[in-house]
Amino acid sequence: MVFSKRKMKQFLAFGVTIVLVICLYKSWGSPTNGGPPYGEGFDDEALNDGEMAGRKVFERVLKQTQHDPSKTASSSLVGGNSYNGPSNNVGIPPPDDYDPAHDFRMNELHEAKRQILELQRKIQELEGRIPRKYPDVTFLNYKNRKRILITGGAGFVGSHLVDYLMMQGHEVIVADNFFTGRKRNVEHWLGHENFELIHHDIVNPLFIEVDEIYHLASPASPPHYMYNPVKTIKTNTLGTINVLGLAKRVGAKVLIASTSEVYGDPDVHPQPETYWGHVNPIGPRACYDEGKRVSETLSYAYAKQEKVNVRVARIFNTYGPRMHMNDGRVVSNFIIQALQNQSITIYGSGKQTRSFQYVSDLVDGLVALMANNYTQPVNLGNPVERTIQDFAEIIRDLVGGKSQIIELPAVEDDPQRRKPDISRAKKYINWEPRVPLQEGLMKTVDYFRKELARSNHSQRNIFVPETTEFRNLV
């Protein structure tokens, strides 16, 4: 028998009420108007249920202590206010203020708690049998439905891409080693017939059948990719080789998520895809910068030699819900500091510039690039350039706090200017950002505010994916 969540809640409330009524009836029904509970003048008919039960408990304990000197009243009673007098061969009577009915009531309360916990366990078991409610996805028949692999699909950008492709009705397989990704980002799809989650490190080969591959696996924030630079390089080299090898074997189309970091600290501004970059190959950021450059090189080597159908997206600064709170990036740092009324820290003078795009715009660009026949690298970013100082002030004013903006020493090899030339994206895939900065920041601030208020695992902060129809109307 399948219960709705509403009926289950009513069932739980009814059960708890019954248990509490029994406890209260037995506990509050006993008068406390003086007089010795036992001895001369003991009136059985005047006792309520609690006192009668208490009398029986005490008589049983007294008989046990008289029969077996090793047993005392305290060893026979459970609960508070137990009598802890020494035992002897004749038994020790309880003190004058001893109330066995109180012990009985305490036992009843403990039993009520146990029954409530058992009831909750049964409710959870019943909930597990109820089919989960998923967002309404578009139905595609087997001719139009694709099997799509997303490496790093439990991460920030990957989880939003999962939402988009699931809403379109495709079968989505996520492979993630959860270094920076989290199951919580995709938990609303767990159990869906079109969704599969694989705990897998793409540094090791993966053997599955797919039609398309989005290769997003790699830590993308400086603290994360500099934490283990060797692993970062392996993910972007060996991991890319494994993805391209899989695409070769099954004839899948593959999109490689590159980065604006391939341009390094650029001498050309804004940065077109034809710019070769200005990168320090042995600096602290080289594990990520050069790793992505090699990833691009591998992609086009496989395309030329093995005829693999590749796409390369150079992603600029992106923000939105599900960003890692400790990723060390500008948006998450500023929002967390502002929400906690801490000082907003800027590394350097604050005059360095960045271009920020909302995550849904990036997802639209990735999907458009995958569907297009254009094979050269494409910049995906917001061409509106802002200084870090201006961005910090915008977030502080949006949150409404009184955080002070302070400057810290500059980070080594930190690019001073960053702005994409998206002419190629406009021309070949008909894409440009659409979400205004204020709108995107409001959604992101709201997400982080809920995350900071969360105190246990049961408090969910699911960012409900927008329908395809709604995104098309924006």
Image (tube, rainbow, N blue to C red):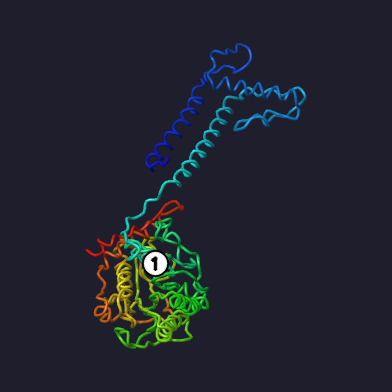
Seen from this angle, which residue lies furthest top? 41
Q: Is residue 408 above or below residue 173?
A: below
Q: Position of residue 233 (x, y in %)?
A: 49, 79
* Depicted 406 relative to depicted 55: above or below: below
Residue at label 1? 147
Give the residue drawn at x 53%, y 14%: 46
Tell me how many marks there are: 1
Q: Position of residue 113 (x, y in %)?
A: 52, 36
Question: Outermost residue toward the front?
Answer: 143
Left or right of residue 117, residue 11 in this image: left
The answer to whether residue 170 is above or below residue 420 is: above
The answer to which of 372 and 439 lies nearer the viewer is 372
Q: Quadrant of the C terminus?
A: bottom left
- Tell me the quarter of the picture where residue 189 sits: bottom left
Residue 378, percent from left and from top: 32, 80
Q: Can you tell which quarter of the image residue 349 is in?
A: bottom left
Q: Residue furthest right?
A: 89
Give the residue at the far left of this rendering: 473
Mark 1 nearby-residue class (10 Å; few <14, some 14–19, many ≥20): some
Amino acid carrying label 1: it is: Arg
Where is residue 243, by image quadrant?
bottom left
Badge 1 element: strand
Residue 32 location (% of width, % of height): 52, 21
Question: Closest to the observer: 8 or 446?
Answer: 8
Q: Considering only vertical position in the picture, is 234 above or below 7?
A: below
Q: Is residue 280 left or right of residue 273?
A: right
Going 50% across and 42% down the picture, which residue do you hit?
Answer: 121
Left or right position of 456 against 68: left
